[in-house]
Amino acid sequence: MRIEEKFKELKERKEKALIGFVTAGYPSAEDTKEIANALIKGGIDILELGLPFSDPIADGVTIQRASESSLRAGMNPDLYFEVAARIKGAEKVCLTYYNLVLQRGLEEFVKDCESAGIKGLIVPDLPVEESKPLLKICEGYETDLIFLVAPTTTEPRMAKILDAASGFIYVVSLLGVTGAREKLSDSIRPHIRRIKEMELSMDRPVPLAVGFGISKPEHVRAVCEVADGAIVGSAFIKIIEEGLRSEDDMLRKIEEFARSLKKETKGA
Amino acid sequence: MLSKPDEQGKYGIYGGKFAPEVLMSALEELEEAFNSFSHDKSFKEELELLLRTYAGRPTSLYFAKNLSEAFGARIYLKREDLVHGGAHKLNNTLGQCLLAKHMGKRRIIAETGAGQHGVATAMAAAVLELECEVYMGTEDVERQKLNVFRMKLLGARVNPVDSGSKTLKDAINESMRDWVTNVENTYYLIGSVVGPHPYPLMVREFQRVIGKETKEQILNAEGRLPDTIIACVGGGSNAMGIFYDFLEDDEVELIGVEAAGKGLESGEHGASICAGTKGVLHGMYSKLLQDRHGQIKQSYSFAPGLDYPGVGPELAYLAESGRVKMVSATDEETLSAFEILSMSEGIIPALESAHAIHYAIEEAKRKAKERRNHLIVVNLSGRGDKDIFLVEKVLGDKCNVH
Ligand SMILES: Cc1ncc(COP(=O)(O)O)c(C=O)c1O
């Protein structure tokens, strides 16, 4: 199912999307499959699987540490696509940095995404101005190139982004890098309103999913009141981190946490 | 040929803006501010006054008589080591701090490797009354204690960076993360001709003063242009600074010297153009040191200012086009040049600059066989005070100190 169809299906059920992010290969490639299954059992709708890069400038310490650890444990694109292909039960999107896409070759990378059942690609250091070559290739496959819109994105930029966007828009909730925050940013509502107005005027209704800093059920509830989905990443990675230090049943915790978040996307 | 970035900030295929969306409007704002202020008369006068009375410009073009006699060419040194702070870095930080001030940004952040750019930023921020924070890898904090202390004395806060390889590239990552977070009140002052557009253009423009002065000075001294200009290349700012105004003078050979570290074959070096491949890092498409998957490799040089796995896009472009010739010098070769210049001219060069001195000596020896009076200008980008402890450690008893 294409990503936009997934959002449509959820809408019919009066649900919003819960998108869960984890770094592939953290703590190991084998663990990733089990962690993904726990997330899926807990009810996430879309799995965002990170392919780690050595220099993740858009990420806060939690995901940086996970990326470093995953790379040290031997994660690489070949292994990533193998792992991704084995995960079933949710729609999958890939998050990585542009250099990894470039070095594999744009077409090769997108082809591998399609073969592994990955329906979307998020590249946080690829702004719309530089996205043409990759966008063109994505259009030839069943893969959406997913763009980010930030609170600082100006109207002219937003128009360019909406024009190129498909799948969903990754709405960056705050000025900053990824990482769990205590409080949700106050500016989310006006930020979303601004994007929706632009979507309306351009007649391009791409679903909006909000990410960065979302770490609690009440955050998810608040986001789902105004947007089509919530993206949670660092909060899951933290559970994995803690799980490595203690004897806790990390997989069960992940599943339960995912369930507690998913509940908030229903009937919103 | 004069190189100029296109609308997307590209030099041929190199350059561009590969930055997180949060920063894209800040980069646009920066580009506009730079375009308007760099043509503004009062801005130019203010900068010119600072460069003259604070930084100590123009720096002299010194005829290195002893070195010339020893190796058989006429060798001049462009004395950027005499700039306040001890390196060319201040040319850029004064320009950018002034720009930040005009843009109404009061908080300056910068990355530093050797600490030279950090020190130069702290100085410019102090004199222009701006707040300054510098990111520095913990490995470099350890290697360059003296500069850490200087920055603190100058009123800057030094933030150690413990991620990744704990060196310059990670300090840049952390600066970008800070900028993403505080973009509304913060100016990110990049220290070389790297990063997303407009940084490579802007830093080159602020460093161009080196080449402009050199051209006038060499014409006065010799009545002709040099045959060869040589500069070391880390990110490429001192090289682009001295090269740019000679780009259209085809008879002038331009040579950039990268760090070959323990040798290009060893894999432990900082030679992104000589031994790297194309890719995207820190917001730019350029030549990088990376593995086949695109993970960035750790660079190595005993000169911390050259210890970076990337290079400025304009230089990558000029090298590919053939206008600039790129070579490299190992730690060992550089150390020998460091000693030679210290002994023969009484000038202790920065280890970075000593890479260029090494190649100048080699070039002089080669050319001495072909012709008389081959005219070489070397950009002596900095002085070596910061390096003496490291050199002492490496040289140990071998050092001829009496
Ligand atoms: C004295 C000196 N020369 C050269 C460099 C290398 O930088 P660039 O290639 O940008 O001139 C540095 C960097 O710290 C430096 O301190």
Image (spheres, rainbow, N blue to C red):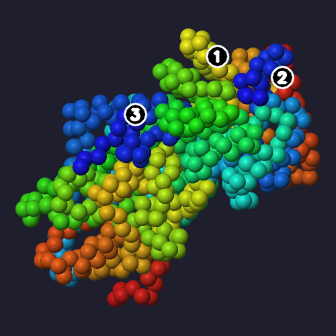
User: Which of the labelled discs sits on residue B349, or is there none?
Assistant: none
Which numbered mark, 1 or 3, is in the foreground of this view? 1
Task: Say which residue label 1 marks.
Answer: A205
Q: Position of residue A236 (x, y in %)?
A: 79, 40
Left or right relative to A145: residue A220: right
Please tell me if label 1 and label 2 are on a single chain: yes
Q: Which residue is at 92% across, 42% downward?
A: A252
Beta carbon at label 2 within 8 Å of ligand 1:
no
How far, Cα to Cα, is label 3 from label 2?
41 Å
Q: Chain of mark 3?
A: B
Near-viewer residue (B400 or B228): B228
Q: Element type at marker 3?
A: helix
Q: Which residue is at 43% across, 75% downward?
A: B331
Please tell me if label 3 and label 2 are on a single chain: no
Left or right relative to B68: residue A184: right
How far, Cα to Cα, is label 1 from label 3?
32 Å
User: Which of the labelled discs sits on residue A264, or is there none?
Assistant: 2
Q: Evaluate if marks 1 and 3 touch, with contact meaning CB atoms under 8 Å apart.
A: no
Which numbered mark, 1 or 2, is in the foreground of this view? 1
How far, Cα to Cα, is label 1 from label 2?
23 Å
Q: Is residue A200 visible?
A: yes
Q: Residue lying at the far front in this picture: please name it.
A: A140
Vertical arrangement, residue A175 with respect to residue B119, above or below: above
Near-viewer residue (B289 or B139): B289
Vertical arrangement, residue B119 with respect to residue B372, above or below: above
Residue A17 figure quarter: top right
Left or right relative to B176: residue A238: right
Please tell me if label 1 and label 3 are on a single chain: no
How busy is the neighbourhood of tag 3: few (under 14 within 10 Å), some, or many (20 plus)?
A: many
Q: Element type at marker 1?
A: loop
Q: Position of residue B36 (x, y in %)?
A: 29, 30
Residue B62 figure quarter: bottom left
